Amino acid sequence: MSLRTTGRGDLESIFSVHQQAFGGAEEARLAMELLADPSARPVVSILAEEGDRSVGHVLFTRVRIQPADAVSAAILAPLAVVPDRQGRGIGGELVEAGLNELAERGVALAFVLGHPGYYPRFGFEPAGARGLQPPYPIPEEHAGAWMVRAFREDILGAVRGRVACADTLDREKYWVE
């Protein structure tokens, strides 16, 4: 398997991976809209391939922390692996590659709204407990799904506020169960 940064010629492959992974087009359309959304830039978009087959994709897009807008931050959404390749570590390799790219770019924080049993292995921890609120309220029983990863030791606790996503992702339907 190989990982590589995507380009404009990869849109069909990205759409296909998300459509297969989620069994429909909603997440695939979300990925396409985020890639086209100027408010999401800069992005980190990485494709996993086995031979000539695309088997996974991860996308990180820009977020702002209000009122501390000077902090560079991103959010992981969405992550997809085609069904017959799930459970083989591809998703983890995509997440690690994306986080490494963010760190190289000097990003201070990465966020995710995801499974609290999966993302802590990548250094994510509950964001709400650190004073970093999601774009929309998350019910208390799911609060642990809103997570942050710091790339600098001094940043957590020093920055507080509400996370504002790219226009495409700043829709309540993506934040409620």
Image (spheres, grey):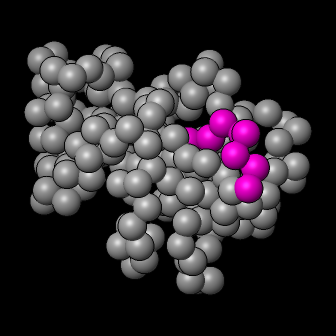
Q: Is residue 48 toward the left or the right of residue 117 in the image? A: left
Q: Residue at x 51, y 60 (%)?
A: 113
Q: Residue at x 62, y 83 (%)?
A: 140
Q: Is residue 154 above or below residue 167?
A: above
Spot occupied by residue 70 in the image (x, y as percentages of width and height):
73, 39
Q: Is residue 31 toward the left or the right of residue 132 in the image? A: left
Task: Please name whichever residue, 93 or 145, is drawn nearer the observer in this view of the structure.
Answer: 145
Task: Please name whichever residue, 55 or 44, is drawn nearer the observer in this view of the structure.
Answer: 44
Q: Main secondary structure of the magenta part?
A: loop
Q: Is residue 68 magenta?
A: yes
| Image quarter of the N terminus | top left
Question: Magenta region: which residues?
Answer: 67-74
Spot occupied by residue 2 in the image (x, y as percentages of width and height):
31, 17
Q: Is residue 7 magenta?
A: no
Q: Residue at x 73, y 56 (%)?
A: 67
Q: Is residue 50 above or below residue 15?
A: above
**Is residue 48 something that shows in the picture?**
yes
The residue lying furthest to the bottom in this view is 140
Spot occupied by residue 38 in the image (x, y as percentages of width and height):
38, 38
Spot occupied by residue 146 in the image (x, y as percentages of width and height):
59, 63
| Image quarter of the C terminus | bottom left
